[in-house]
Amino acid sequence: MKNILHINTHASAGGAAVVMQRLADMVRRQGMASAILTGAPAFGQAPDLKAAKYTGLHAWTTWRGQQDYGFQKNHALVRSSLFQQADIIHLHNLHGGYFNLWSLPLLSALKPTVWTLHDMQALTGHCAHSLDCKRWLPETGCGSCPSLSAYPRLWRDATRQLWQDKRTIYTHSSLYLVTPSVWLQRLTEKSLLKEQPLVCIPNGADTSIYRPLDQQEARRLLGLPQDALLVGGCADGGLANPWKGGRYALETILELKKTFPSLYFLNIGVKSTPTELQGAGWVQHIRYVHEPAKLARLYAALDLLLYPTLADNHPLVCIESLCCGTPIVGFATGGVPEIVRDGLDGLLVSTHDGTALTKAAATLLQDTTLREKMSKEAEISAAQRFNLELFTQRYEKLYGEVLERPRSLEKSRLPLDKVPNIVKSPAFMRQEWSKYPHPSRQQQKKLLSHAIAGGICTTIGTLAGWPLLVAALFRSLYRRYRNR
């Protein structure tokens, strides 16, 4: 029986976590064991790799722009029972403030390691979505970053070093990559990960939950108006999410309301109400929906879903909406055109073209016959293309293949001259030493010299970081006091 260990930032929040949970549940039904390890505590849902953020070393590396280099816990992951019992390690999002990438070479040498890329962060110097920036390509290798504030934020521009460090790490790692979209697959094939084996496996949805429901009944159960033209938007933060094109969605629904007085809008995933919509009786704000059955009813109640995303890979929102028979109007961004077939089960326009977005939504709202035709196309095609059985079969096939491929502890040995001294903590050097079962005298001398240099550097960094940590604490307390 195969035993899979999944590692992700969260156990349930976000698309990557949902994909991970669906896969873990499905392979358990096939008789495999499947455990989950997270970077953030999950209230008992899963063990966690929570990193110690409030340390001098983490404060120092954060201030220097050396993303996550202060985290030490995952260097010792190889000694945990979860790791030792696993046949395969399946990585998901490694960003989010918990995982030090310098442990990847050893982890992937000891266990077959699959890594599903849910965004672009593995390809870039720091950002999860590069948008129009091409500096992450090998010809440039990042540096002079135009968007340091983009998630995950950097305080200093260390993107060139981070990109080069990733290249070193990947060169000495044995990874089996998965992208949910052909769009991200093509980008990965141009990136610093291009030498690693790569396959595209589209995301899936539970079609026993996300399925066509009677629209009138769904509206009755949710207390929504029966005779309205119901449009919805679904994103973490609702219309306030800049990545999902909240500004374009807001402009579109305000324009549509002028033409369609019966328009009613559902702002799903909201955290705060946009100023323009405060007091609007034709808008209902719905917080993040955790129950899949309720989310399916919301999709089914809609006449169309508005999804003008600016940065996306293979969004579950689009898959789930189509499985419920709800057509989509949105931007042709990332992997969205691989889900929404323009003219068949939705209408897609060029990214950032707000005028075309409004026109496409109006076309669908005023043509009931077209909406019904697209709804039928959506529910049939989506269930065939994105069901969980097909999704699971593809991953099971990959798991079987990676178990048969050889791995090398020798390959995982990092060129320590290329590793920043701030990384060479005692925990890191212990993992490096373990790669030499019978080190020669020369190897011992080299490892010891790097351990001493790293020990001095990390000690200085830890001491230098404490004043930064205290200053950050006082700034936080001051802001809270000022905002009272």
Image: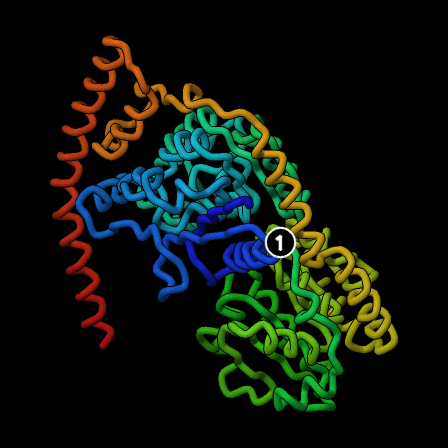
Q: Looking at numbered disc 1 in the image, what kind of residue is underneath it?
A: Gln
Res. 421 image quadrant: top left
| Residue at image point 31% right, 45% down | 155
Res. 432 image quadrant: top left
Q: Position of residue 326 (x, y in %)?
A: 73, 71
| Residue at image point 69% right, 69% down | 208
Q: Position of residue 266 (x, y in %)?
A: 60, 79
**Count of numbered labels shown in the rendering:** 1
* Image quadrant occupied by the N terminus: top right
Q: Can residue 243 be seen from the camera position used here?
A: no
Q: In this view, does 302 lie above or below 414?
A: below
Q: Position of residue 484 (x, y in %)?
A: 22, 77
The single residue placed furthest to the front in the displayed view is 1
Q: Which of 370 and 48 is in front in this view?
A: 48
| Residue at image point 65% right, 71% down | 252
Q: Nearer the viewer, residue 216 or 348?
A: 216
Question: Which residue carries the number 1 mark?
Answer: 30
Q: What element carries label 1?
A: loop
Q: Can residue 473 be seen from the camera position used here?
A: yes
Q: Position of residue 325 (x, y in %)?
A: 76, 71
Res. 383 image quadrant: bottom right
